[in-house]
Image (cartoon, rainbow, N blue to C red):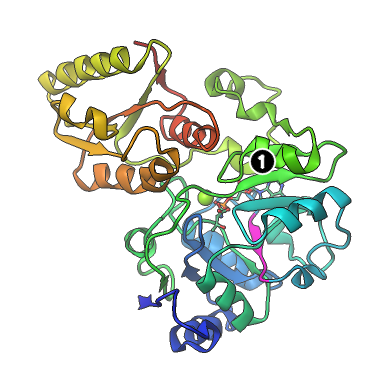
Amino acid sequence: HNVVDKHVDNLISHPHVQQAASWINRDEPVAFPTETVYGLGANALSDKAVQKIFTAKGRPADNPLIVHISAVDNLAGVVDEIPAQARLLMAKFWPGPLTLVLPRGSQVCQSVTAGLDTVAVRMPAHPVALALIEACGKPLAAPSANLSGKPSPTRAEHVLHDLSGRIVGVLDGGETGVGLESTVVDVTGEVPLLLRPGGVTQSELEEVVGRVEIDPALSYHLDSVHNTAAFRPRSPGLKYKHYAPDGEVFLVSLAKGVKAMRRYIQECALRDREQGYSVAVLTTDDGKGFYVADLVISLGDRTRLERVAQRIYAALREADQAQIQRIYVESFPTAAVGEAIMNRLLKAAQGRMLEP
Ligand code: TXA
Ligand code: MG
């Protein structure tokens, strides 16, 4: 567990960054901070190293990884050709929380792409991540640094909680900024296809490349979509259980307004506690005084969705720490980053959306 202050000069030669780079160069995966969540990085050109990521996380082998670079030049061998729309998006959003799915280059190893003919790439906007990639001199394949299925880590302690004993180390750069994983866009077709909402929103993308379509697998009726035999998501990760704490999560709809939502949650909480369940509620500052439950967590100001996004995974983990059995979560409007927030919450709830 190596702490690195992201504000210091010359991070590349920082001893902790150098140590991490030497582990990676010996094919040992290391966890590191990015602006979205912590990643578990390994040399994207070494099959042996990448295999260790899958083992450490318990990740299904058919779920491909994102390759992280520190400069567009690093894409040589990872991606053979860069479509025009991809260039525009890179120029506008890199470094930043945008992952592009591109035709796969010849040097990326098979396990990174899980056998697909495309590869996902991004340039993270975090000085420690960029320094680490530079210090290794290699593109890094990195999924989020959590056990497969659990909420992504936004602090080094979350990484240690999940992976301690399974990886050689974590570079601790403090709390991450965005708090949710990057936006994933497939730019191999004529019209870009949004595969995972994130910090960069659909309308921000559309300002740069015109129309962007949304993968039908992102529909909010996940249950019915998943039950269709024809359901074959373009992003393999979509079909797995995700972001779920040990406690059962229930997302409660905002369709009848904030007041109705809160009354309904409080009724559920009372009923569950009478039946002997421990109950947590995830709310915002304005709702904190309203609830009686075993644990009430505020995600901040309801009107500041970016702060809410930053806190969600830590809150879900806090409920697990308190050994909560049922976690009721308030919904948010799906404007801007709210789209990504609701996407992750619905997955944590495994599609359970309760209507007051
Ligand atoms: O913010 C992030 O993206 C973080 C940080 C560490 O960079 N990484 C991350 O990685 O969230 P991971 O592995 O948890 O999620 C990668 C997602 C998965 O849903 C995966 O299926 C999708 O990207 N993906 C990777 N390669 C793909 C490809 N070639 N085509 C379609 N989807 C792909
Ligand atoms: Mg993940």
Whether 284 is among the magenta residues is: no
Q: Is residue 67 magenta?
A: yes
Identify which residue, 173 or 150, lies in the foreground: 173
Please provide percent x and percent y for residue 29.
Answer: 52, 72
- For residue 235, what is the image quadrant? top right
**SS at circle 1:** helix
Residue 153 percent across, percent down from the top left:
41, 55
- Where is residue 5 drawn, in percent x and y? 40, 76
User: Looking at the image, which residue is at 24% across and 38% down?
Assistant: 297
* Screen quadrant of the C terminus: top left
Cβ of mark 1 under 8 Å from ligand 1: the answer is no
Question: In the figure, 71 relative to 307: above or below?
Answer: below
Residue type at the position of mark 1 = Glu
- Name the residue at 19% across, 44% down: 322
Is 124 in front, or is 305? 305
What range is drawn magenta here? 65-70
Within 10 angstroms of label 1, few (less than 14), some, or many (20 or more) residues?
A: some
In this rendering, would 274 be left or right of 145? left
Q: Which residue is mark 1?
A: 204
